[in-house]
Amino acid sequence: MSLDRELACAIELARLAGAEAARMQRAELGVEMKPGDEPVTVADRRASELIVAGLAESFPGDPVISEELPPAPGALGAPRVWLVDPIDGTKDFIRGEDGYSVMIGLACDGVPTLGVVYQPAIDRLFWGTPAGSVVVHEGQTRRLAVSEVAAAADVRLVASKSHRARELDHVKRELGIDNELNIGSVGVKLCVIAAGLRDLYVNPAAKTKVWDTCAPEAILAPAGGRLSDLFGNPIDYTRELAHRRGLVASNGRVHDEVIAKLAPLFAHMVR
């Protein structure tokens, strides 16, 4: 199955929405707070409008779920569904920093199949399909591949910048990790693992949603990486919006060891 048309459309819309968001970042953002004490700006909504309208025009038979819109009934279980986070890492965006991204993912039969993650502030574009994953930056195009790190104690952790859970200190102690980088966007965190620049991401919280992970998982998996919940189970994109059992993303080589060593820390959670 060729995804050339879908990929070209997603890249075009991500760049378009990213340019609009970057323009609006320099203006009055009109920050509001959503339930869960999460900020949203006029730029989030404008980027969402651009992407949703573009996908609906190009693929009228596909439902589109955006973070900024209520999902249509049954959309998540459709054979093909687009999952959009118009600005992932809104707090970085509000602060005028570069750790945010525009994310567009396509899930087919519940599997992330195409993903685009675009960082407008530094014009860095990640994309992935089952044929492979690529980063385009500073005029160069490079195929992505995860690192060769094979032991949990050697991993370079990437963690949240604005939502860093206190449990992460326990995670680092349990795994023997002393190397940590903090980035705002979940999508960018997974993409730097896909690029071999980092090796592990652990999120014990239940705040992430399907639009946070669909696009970057479609980039991480072809690069050799793996995404699961805290107990090693695959992420379900067919039944509910929220990831209620946390997230672990890795280069794949350390995944089973990490899951096994962290099991006692999260035994209290519902599997």
Image (cartoon, rainbow, N blue to C red):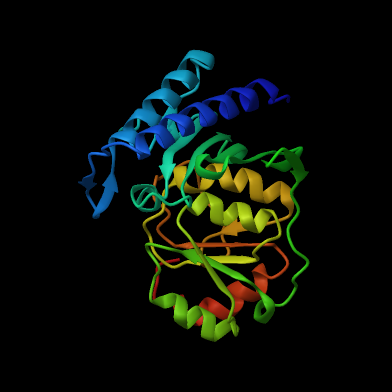
Side of 195 relative to 183 (left or right): right
**Is 152 rendered above or below residue 212?**
below
Question: Dividing the picture into quarters, in which one does residue 200 lie?
Answer: bottom right
Q: Tell which of 92 and 145 is nearer to you.
A: 92
* Quarter of the rendering occupied by the C terminus: bottom left
Residue at figure coordinates x 52%, y 61% from the top left: 229
User: Residue 177: where, in percent of width, then height?
Assistant: 59, 81
Residue at figure coordinates x 66%, y 75% from the top left: 257
Question: Dividing the picture into quarters, in which one does residue 150 lie?
Answer: bottom right
**Is 180 rendered above or below residue 194?**
below
User: Residue 83: where, in percent of width, then height?
Assistant: 47, 36
Residue at figure coordinates x 41%, y 53% from the top left: 208
User: Residue 90: where, in percent of width, then height?
Assistant: 37, 48
Side of 203 relative to 11 (left or right): left
Q: Tell which of 271 and 60 is nearer to you.
A: 60
Please say whether residue 68 is visible from this viewpoint.
no
Please say whether residue 116 is visible from this viewpoint.
yes
Side of 67 relative to 236 (left or right): left
Number of dots carrying numbers: 0
User: Residue 262: where, in percent of width, then height?
Assistant: 54, 78
* Quarter of the rendering occupied by the N terminus: top right
Side of 266 relative to 232 (left or right): left
